[in-house]
Amino acid sequence: MKKTITIIDTFGFLFRSYFALPPLKSKDGFPTGLLTGFMNFISNIGKDFQTDYLVFALDAKGDTFRNEIYNQYKAHRPDVPEDLLKQLPIAIEWIEKMGFKTAMQSGFEADDIIASIVHDAKIKDLEVRIVSHDKDLYQLIDDDRVYLFDPIKKSVINEDKCFEKYGVRPKQFIDYQSLLGDSADNVPGVKGVGAKTAEALIKEYGSLDAIYENIESIEKARWKTLLEEGKEMAYISKQLVTLHTECHNIEEIDNYTLPIENPILKIADILQEYDLSRVLDRVNKEGLNYKTKIPEKTVKEDEKIEYITLDEERKLFNVIDNIPNDTIVSFDTETTDLDTKNATLVGFSFCFEKNRAYYIPINHNYLGVTKQVDIDVAKKAIEKLNDKKLVLQNFKYDYAVIKNQLEIELKLYADTMILAWLLNSSEKIGLDALAEKFFDHEMIAFKDVVKKGEDFSNVDIIEATKYAAEDALYTYKLYFKLLEEFDKIDAKKLVDIAFKYEFDFIYVLEYMENNGIKVDTNKFKLLKESNGKFIQNLTSKIYESAGSEFNINSPKQLGEILFDLLKLPPSKKSKSGYSTNEVVLQKLKEEHSIIPLLLEYREASKLQSTYIKPLLELGLKNKENRVYTSFLQTGTATGRLSSKNPNLQNIPVRSDAGGEIRSAFIPKDGYKLVGIDYSQIELRLLAHFSQDEALVEAFRQDKDIHRQTAVKIFGEELADSKRAIAKSINFGLLYGMGSRKLGDTLGIPAKEAKVYIDAYFENFVSVKEYLKSIENRAMTDGYVETLLGRRRVFDFDSANEMMKAAFLRESVNTLFQGSAADLIKLSMLEIYKKYKNDADVKMLLQIHDELIFEVKEENVDKITKNIVEIMENIYKLIIPLKVSKSIGNSWQELK
């Protein structure tokens, strides 16, 4: 039997180990995530694989021969996290202290070292295992002789896996990478050639040389042009990606045998210092795992999974008709567009078993497409599925698509995206991320299925089945996994919140998105023209002030003008040039006449590009001149809604230009816009939670809370003049504002601001204690709860002091902002229930604590009164809930 040498791609493995584990720390606060992952790997040698010889390949410091070939090689790599940098040298030191062999050569990378050892090992007839998942090493794979081993997933990467993932063989991988390039290492490749094009070219011609020898026979004109223009870079890229095989040899192979003495026990004292005693406990209990006799290599097989295409009516209904009515069924659609108004349904998938899922093709469109299900049959099938307990990931999208395309209103049982958000609102909640987190499964990427410039209808049905059915399967698995996770943390209440409020709220948002809001396109045309002239005028003034013309939008050129030509004091200079961000410009405001002009230019340009032009284009897309935004229920950690495409929540409120934009949002003929806004909702919640007598009394008597605060701090005579200061204090405390920040806000010294804050707490005695209790509970429980019981989780255990301070501020902020979000959500649910089918009123927008409606003019007073009543009585606080209302002919008039 062949002997085996295992080569560790050291930095690649350690980097991945760092990002795979949470940010663990020792009792002293030193980061230990990377070190923990590394020691787990060492302790599992023999469990995960057996080997005769082992070596750690290392990168040498400084440039390599590749930098001489192409000076931009690896030029744009992002900075490495500080916590990772702290742990790297310790891990390298431990390798040698444990008695393992390392290999490194100046001027070469670890990948070249690995390639050289592979070359030498093959001559010596050794089996080679490379511990890495780095695609740069795929060129070395040679089945049964050389393969990669992924230490995180504990799986072997061989020729078949390479072909399955990239569509090319390992021997073709160098040429494939030469075409595609590598953005991580700044390998240029052929500009414009993506993964699918590179794959197709290699499959057709076999190699880079053959491609260029036969370039005249390439039928696609665009491919031919790209290849001709990118030939030089293709061959430069080939030099960059080709690994060298002469920089290291393993003549004295016995030097690479595994240590006889347990390597982990050699550094036992050091591991104790870093609080890694669990590794030691396991090693002491289990001893050495590696043996001298090498068993056959085994590959951990995944659970047997079936993805089935149902392309005939009979087969489709044979499956659906055998699903019991009370069954959980996951459901997902595949379409041509992310915008539900433009999307065509291409197919749908569903799953009701843990290892089998189905895909139903409807509208695939490519040469040689196989049979598909008729749209009427698909409609009937979805109607039958609608009687089951449907579970979806991001239900709002699929609901809108099915409603628009088939006139069916899907009935939701549960949305896994909402459940994941309720479990932890600060983490990623996309299906790919959740599958990776809970199942250690890498989902098929959309970009690997759909070619650039195409859509899902162009995808081969076999490939589409794998992609779509996988989505359905993992949505199904995820639903049950999330319920387990809620049980683990004894948080059934969060599941109840989902079923009681959050799932129903999705229908409210889809209804609002479908309503849209009308814009005055003529006004936007005038705004575009006048703002364009204003920008031109500012440009001329800036050139005059600078004494030369330059690209104002180029930070590099602007930095040179400000700090080299005009000699203004720079804040800092990096490799890419001087910083010219807003903070820098604001500090220089008094230094030169050009600075205020630049600030005006940036604001006007942002308004033009972010609001005026896009809103005009969107308004002209339909005859009603309505703009449709998308609301994100899970877009913030506090629970507030956010909006996108376009974002209508961030239009400037206080500037004249923002007012001009808002004045172009109007009601349709015969209607008025109505704005209803919760008054001082977060301060009312402070009174409710803290039960401070002075605050509660002020609200119960309906007094001006900011003036009352001013009276308490400054006395009756100064109350009116100091009301603005009192207002800043009232709101600042809810956002964790300290004396320094309050001082900056008010333009006064921090000492003076502290006097104001102290005076506030002397008069509102319960508030200080209550705010402190929020922070204490957050530290103890690891989360805060809003009015309805939604949680925001904070990882204090892994946080440094700065992060902990931020978490404490956010815990206070979340309680009030999140509870305010709860209240307006309850109101929206009630208003939707009452008015969803009423043509006289449409709920259009939610801007944090305000709702905007379009109401028929003749019924505006009656309907507004009813909505006010709903909002003021939606929840019983110990003080009254109050709203302010306004009616107008534009959004700007709603003040």
Image (cartoon, helix red, strand yellow):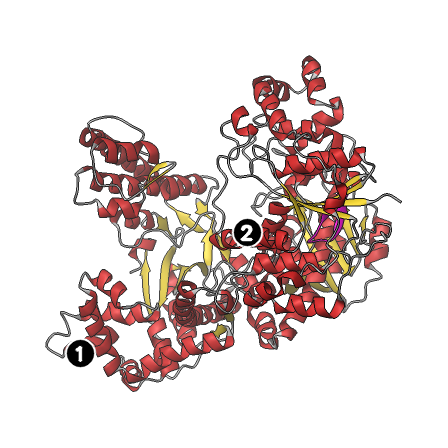
Q: Which mark is residue 711?
A: 1
Magenta extent: 148-157
Mark 2 or mark 1: whose residue is earlier in sequence: 2
Q: Is residue 155 magenta?
A: yes
| Magenta stretch prevailing secondary structure | strand
Would residue 798 be found to the left or right of residue 608 on screen?
A: right
Relative to 268, is 459 above or below?
Answer: above
Residue at position x 77%, y 58% in the image: 47
Q: Position of residue 42 (x, y in %)?
A: 69, 57
Quarter residue 451 falls in: top right
Q: Position of residue 279 (x, y in %)?
A: 66, 66
Q: Amino acid at mark 2?
A: Leu
Q: Is residue 387 magenta?
A: no
Residue at position x 61%, y 44% in the image: 343
Label 2 sits on residue: 88
Quarter residue 259 falls in: bottom right
Viewer-proximal residue, 41 or 820? 41
Q: Position of residue 442 (x, y in %)?
A: 68, 50
Would residue 139 be found to the left or right of residue 423 on screen?
A: right
Relative to 471, is 797 above or below?
Answer: below
Q: Amino acid at mark 1?
A: Val
- Give the distance between the C-alpha atoms of the residues marked 2 and 1, in whole angstroms: 59 Å
Q: Position of residue 426 (x, y in %)?
A: 51, 62
Q: Nearer the viewer, mark 2 or mark 1?
A: 2
